Image: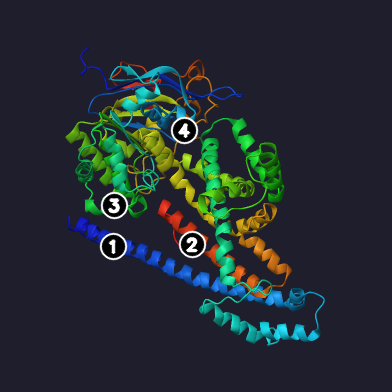
Amino acid sequence: MTDSQQTAAAQDAQMVVEKDRNRAALRKTFYGRILRSVIVGFWVMVIAFSLMRLSPGDPVRLALGADVTEEAVDAFRTQLGLDKPFYIQFWDYFTGIFRGDLGYSYFSGRDVTEIIGTHLPVTLMIIGLSILFAALISLPLALFVATSKSNTVNYMFRALTSVSLAIPGFFLALLGLLVFGVYFNIAPAAGYEGAFPGNLKYLWLPALANCGSLVPVLSRVLHSSLVDTLDEEFVETGVIRGVRKGRFYWSYLLRPSLAPTVVLLSYMVGVMIGGTVIMETIFSLPGIGRELITAVDGRDYPVVQSIAMIFGLIVVFFSFIGDLTGYLLDRRVTLS
Amino acid sequence: MSASNTPLIQVRDVVIGIPHKRRPTLTIVNKANFDINYGEMVGIVGESGSGKTMICRTMIGTLERRGGKILSGDVLFEGESLARASESDWKKLRGKSIGYVPQSALAGPNPVLTIEAQLAEALRNTGDTKNIKSRSKELLELVKIRRVDTVLKQYPYQLSGGMRQRVMIACALATSPKLLIADEPTTGLDVTVQSQIMDLLKEIRSTMGTAIVLISHDLALIDEVCDRVVVMHAGATVEVGSVKELVKPRHPYTIALNSSRIDIAQPGSELVTIKGNAPSVGEWNPGCRFADRCSIVQADCRTGEHPELIGASGTHQTACIHTELLERI
């Protein structure tokens, strides 16, 4: 009896330790990710800052055009601070960030924080909508294929996802425009209107086109996790226990399988940003990606380096959200 | 015949196969025959691939999920056919009258649900949704788990293997089933935990009167806890009898199993093993499937069908047609 009491006490202690360890891991991850996002943001900004200045093209001449005097060029250069040495320019910009000053566009003279403030929400909404659509398509699709015993269904799934993955996003976007914009006339081909629910009319097609590359990857990963889960003994326990259908699909199949897919999806936000830049151009949407392209064309240094920094922060933020969601879905997932 | 005379489970000439679209159906169990009485603890013993898990699946209705099918014969639960049971019949039986403790303690519980949620699921199966929490606690106390309140809030990965298996037993007992099927319930658990789990099963049998089917390849374990033993080899029941009767086995396979037991091996002597491997599914020779491994094999052992059990149900039955030669072994 004393023996088992000792074991019990030891197990008690172990449980407490484990609980503390979990909470500590969670806290550590949270602070770690904040630190990491700061570091990533900084380096992305440094790289964008340097690359822009290393690449050919003079923002001053591009901004002023051809018919200007050398005096005017020099004056404007001094005004922008581009006559100062590289490291002083960097220091000015870097310290500006902490004052909430990201500089002004060389062309429009607009405050960069204001540019980001107006255009970033559009991009974020496209990304959010893409994630939503991708989830709405991938989840039932993977579940259906994984639980189907038919070989044809499995074969079709593999073939179609491969084809879909091979189609470039811009082609899918153009195809979508042709089908939904021209043929069925249910999507506007271009243009944009600001406020939230109304703007969805302009955003759903680009988001759907983004899914062309998202869905195959996600549904394949989820499908293979589901197939593994279906073989697990606890699924049989669920069947025997007579768990209701909806609960069975969620708690016994999807939830134990979702973590890798969710983590992957969050890491793919980086890829999605690239895709969204293309979508904004094709659909003439006033997103941050289009601003970035214009800014790169005009060597608009402050705009480019600020947007690059924001992209870095977004990627790190989403990967944290993904890891956290994975952990909340399945506690076996360890947070790094 | 009154209900008390009818066995709880009657397995009658069961043949199980795995149908395939293009290839011929693969027979994995060919003639299993045995009874389980109310409140009895029966061990099913056999090597891997002998069909013991398949038989157990016919009793919990997960055979079709795994692609298997009862080709002929029947399993009767309180006189009602399980072979022809529809999915809605199963919903009434499975988890209610028949409880199941899975093979692997580590993979048995759902990893994403707390113990409380899993017990609640099992308890809701009874149809009575009142006092779930207090009933959960009672169940955990029944399987001798300490610190019940802590355990309820935990996830399976936070529990040891033995604790997880206790939780699984608790879930299976939620509906006070008449029959509890435990498929190698101590796989992957260390020896001390193994004996604790066995003690627990014995106690449940004696206090709740639950009939228990214990599937194992460990004859020593079954000897220790069961009333009766069903020996399976290559998809057929080859010997059925009480533990006492099986002290003097009447089938060469059981004799071989007995002499290969580690617990009774003489120190210093070589460990006896059974000659050859169990014949693979689909490679069964005509006649007795043990013939190739048998030391007293005769010419007539290799012809015709696999021999059926000789003797009335409830007595010491064997499928060996040359029991007179057994003394030579």
For residue A109, above or below residue B220: below
Residue identifier under label 4: B49
Q: Which quarter of the image is occupied by the N terminus of chain A? A: bottom left
In the image, which disc is placed on residue A16? 1
- Near mark 3 (Cα within 10 A), the count class, few <14, some 14-19 or many ≥20, is few
Instruction: Work out whether residue B217 can be spotted.
Output: no
What is the secondary structure assignment of the residue under circle 3?
helix
- Where residue B93 appears, x then y in whole percent? 32, 26
Name the foreground residue: A32 vs B190.
A32
Measured in 3D between alpha carbons, the distance from the residue under mark 3 to the one under mark 2, in whole angstroms, is 26 Å
* Callout in the foreground (1, 3): 3
Residues at marks 2 and 1, common chain? yes
Q: Secondary structure at mark 4?
A: loop
Question: Which chain is mark 3 on?
Answer: B
Q: Residue at x 19, y 44 (%)?
A: B134
Colour approach in the figure: rainbow
Category of crowding for the residue at label 4, using alpha-carbon neighbours closer than 10 angstroms: few (below 14), some (14–19), many (at least 20): some
Q: Nearer the viewer, mark 3 or mark 2?
A: 2
Question: Looking at the image, which residue is at 51% across and 53% down?
Answer: A196
Q: Position of residue B265 (x, y in %)?
A: 35, 43
Give the Cα separation between the discs numbered 2 and 1: 26 Å
Q: Is residue A177 left or right of residue B162?
A: right
- The residue marked by circle 4 belongs to what chain? B
Q: Which residue is mark 3?
A: B153
* Pointers 3 and 4 within a single chain: yes
Nearer to me, B89 or B140:
B89
Crowding at mark 1 (Cα within 10 Å: few <14, some 14-19, many 20+): few
